[in-house]
Amino acid sequence: MSSSRSQSSGDVAAVEHIRNAAVDDAASIEAVHFSSREAAYSSHVSNWPPPGSGRADRVARWSRWLANSEIHCLVAERNDRIVGFVTVRAATDSDMSAGSVAEMPTLYIDPDHWRSGLGSALCDAGVQRARDLGFTELVLWVLEINTRARAFYARRGFRPDGGTKIDEGTPEGFKAERYHLRFDGEEL
């Protein structure tokens, strides 16, 4: 999959390219993931970075994800550098049908490229990938404190469906809310 679009802010000559990720992209994806999470959450987390694995372990985790044929990852590039990514897989929540409901577990953009249209392009690409795989619905989880992401997904037609959980990736245990998109346009 490939898409070209001019960057909407800054250097209009910069072109984005969306493609399937490869295992070799793990370090670049981890760098975007970490920097985006840091920009969004560091002011909310008592000890940043949160306790847990170091960079080598995070890159190894991404390598495993990218090698898993059931996880579909797309990356956005600008100037031959990965600046965003999205993943899609069958839903993993026990109350969702993995045969018809996809999950978008990640959508992250390098903070230097926020509000440039990349998030929208990657979200659209993730939704299209889920459709192409035969899913009829898509869910994702958003931390309650991430008002920017919640507004972004609402603008794209996702709606909270009542599902909640506690994110255990930080000592604070932030609440996450599940957002849902039906491809037939019907309300939840």
Image: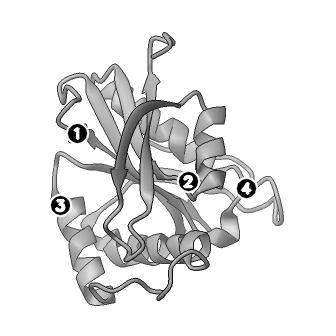
Tell us which disc is closer to us: 2 or 3.
3
Tell us which disc is closer to us: 1 or 3.
1
Tell us which disc is closer to us: 1 or 2.
1
Q: Which residue is mark 3?
A: 67
- Which amino acid type is marked by label 3? Ala
- Which amino acid type is marked by label 4? Ser
Q: Residues within 10 Å of mark 4 (few under 14, many from 20)?
A: some
The number of callouts visible is: 4
Point out residue 184 in the picture as x, y percentages from the top left corner.
Answer: 45, 11
Between 15 and 98, which is closer to the camera in this rendering? Answer: 98
- Which amino acid type is marked by label 1? Asp
| Observer able to see residue 16 | yes
**Badge 2 or badge 3: first in the primary sequence:** 2
Between 135 and 76, which is closer to the camera in this rendering? Answer: 135
Q: CA distance from mark 1 to mark 3?
A: 22 Å
Q: CA distance from mark 4 to mark 2?
A: 13 Å
Point out residue 126 in the picture as x, y percentages from the top left corner.
Answer: 44, 40
Q: CA distance from mark 2 to mark 3?
A: 21 Å
Q: Which residue is mark 1?
A: 93
Asked if marks 4 and 2 touch (Cβ < 8 Å), the reply is no
Q: CA distance from mark 1 to mark 2?
A: 31 Å
Q: Residues within 10 Å of mark 3 (few under 14, many from 20)?
A: some
Q: Which residue is mark 4?
A: 116
Q: Which residue is mark 2?
A: 17
**Badge 4 or badge 2: first in the primary sequence:** 2
